[in-house]
Amino acid sequence: MQFPKASKLLAAGTTSVLLAIGTLTAAVAAGPADQVRIRGTVVSLSGDRLQVNSREGKPVTVTLKAGWKASAVAKANMSDIKPGDFVGIASLPRSEGGDGALEVLILPPQLKGMGEGSYGWDLKPNSTMTNATVADAVKSVNGSTVTVNYHGKEKKISIPEGTPIVTLVPATPEDVKPGAVVFIPAEKSGDGLSAGQLIVGKDGVVPPM
């Protein structure tokens, strides 16, 4: 499935997409100690109060900030990853060496360089998130490998067949409905958790990050 080019997305009025990606990529960069990444399923949304059942099975309440934005994920393919693209790849070390991707997020050119680097990530134990520029993509009968560059460093990441590869597209508050899967970079405060952006699953594609 070919995903929409960034220029077409912008023409369609996707400011919310860029804002949400900006929050997401910023959340990757070592982030403040009061930051919490919430992965789970929507229970209800009433006013600015979002109730989520987290992936750990715990109820979580998030207060959505005024003017909050939602984006959705859309499926992409390995062939959509081109040299020069800025990507966010969650990965795990492989026993045979190198890293294996858990998911790939293709970011629009407007956000190239945001949150650049490789950091600890909490998708799975010992996982990392690498925000970097693709130098090349090598395909073979055994799968695919991308070489990415960040801050003058190089990293090779294998992308096994079946790895979720996505980009982001517009969403509305109406998409944040019971049963929808969400990824929320939230902030911890004395009053609980709050967020200004979130990523929501839509049309059968869920946030893999």
Image (cartoon, grey):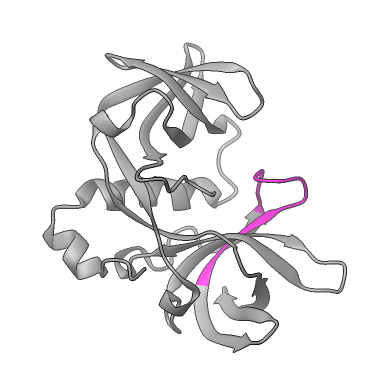
Percent across and percent down for residue 164 are 54, 59
Residue 60 or residue 191, whichever sits in front: 60
Q: Is residue 79 left or right of residue 120?
A: left
Magenta segment: does it hold 183? no
Vertical order, 127 against 117 (above or below): above
Percent across and percent down for residue 187 are 48, 28
Residue 101 or residue 161, whichever sits in front: 161
At 56% from the left and 29% from the top, the residue drawn is 34
At 71% from the left and 46% from the top, the residue drawn is 124
At 41% from the left and 65% from the top, the residue drawn is 76
At 62% from the left and 80% from the top, the residue drawn is 144
Vertical order, 133 against 95 (above or below): below
Residue 154 visible in this rendered orientation of the protein: yes
Per the rendered image, the range of residues in magenta is 120-132
Q: Quadrant of residue 148?
A: bottom right
**Which quarter of the image is occupied by the N terminus?**
bottom left
Percent across and percent down for residue 140 are 64, 88
Percent across and percent down for residue 172 are 23, 36
